[in-house]
Image (cartoon, rainbow, N blue to C red):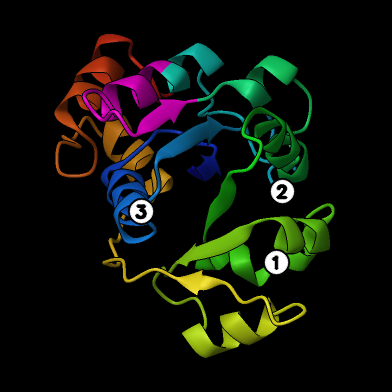
Amino acid sequence: MRVGIFGGTFNPVDNAHIEIAKQFVNELKIDICHIIPANISPFKIKDDDAFQVTNNNRIDMLKLAFTNEPKFLINTFEIDKGGISYSFETIKHIISKNKNSKIFVLIGSDQALNFKEWMQWEWILINTQICIAMREKYSSKEEIINSLELDDRKPVILNNPIIKISATEIRKKLQMNERINELVPISVENYIIKNKLYLND
């Protein structure tokens, strides 16, 4: 089995997340990809929570976004565990459930730049295949590959399209009562509107 892991805050999930996840699965021939919403990201502990929604809201939106996609599984391990979400703990959990499988971890090129600040980053590089989705304005492919090379193990750079979408942009549009149907699936937009998410208090 080739098992993928794609984690994030997904606040909210958007079309870029979906397209990159599909590229990851197709390019690396992933059998099953775990989409894992973080409980608390170690890099966003101090973020303003004015736009935070419930964990159930984020899970619901992910389920809507990946409806009828059999290779994707919404995995709530980090939310169920609680506390700060460390990727190495999640990876160890998935390895324990998928013995004799090859594990692929998808991160963005922005995350690659601070990857050596991740807890047990060397263990992650040794025990998984890191795959990187390029994003706008984040270093060159060569720089990223060289920065994450360890014992002749190199990250894989996806041939993904660069889609310019940010959660901040989505939330601002919602505050201004603008449509976001070009940024998220229509089912996710309808869910956000119905539940009045990301509006000013």
Residue located at (52% from left, 82% from top): 139
Q: Which residues are magenta?
A: 60-74
Which residue appears at 30% of the width and 61% of the height?
A: 164
Vertically, is 38 above or below 201?
below
Q: Nearer the viewer, mark 2 or mark 1?
A: 1
For disc 2, the neighbor class at 10 Å (few under 14, some 14 to 19, many from 20) is: few
Q: Where residue 198 is drawn, which disc sits there?
A: none
At 54% from the left edge and 31% from the top edge, which residue is drawn? Answer: 37
First in sequence: mark 2 or mark 1? Answer: 2
Q: Nearer the viewer, residue 64 or 88?
A: 88
Let me know if residue 140 appears in the view.
no
Task: Give the label on residue 43, or none.
Answer: 2
Amino acid type at mark 3: Lys
Identify the mark nearer the N-term, 3 or 1.
3
The label on residue 114 is 1
Q: Amino acid at mark 1?
A: Asn
Q: Residue 157's image quarter?
A: bottom left
The one of 72 and 79 positioned closer to us in this rendering: 72
* Residue 149 point in image, percent of width and height: 69, 80
- Report crowding for label 1: few under 14, some 14 to 19, many 20 or more residues within 10 A (C-alpha): few
> How far across and down, in percent of the image, does residue 24 sit?
37, 55
Question: Is residue 36 shown in magenta?
Answer: no
Dot 3 corresponds to which residue?
A: 29
Question: In front here: 89 or 135?
Answer: 89
Near mark 3 (Cα within 10 A), the count class, few <14, some 14-19 or many ≥20, is: few
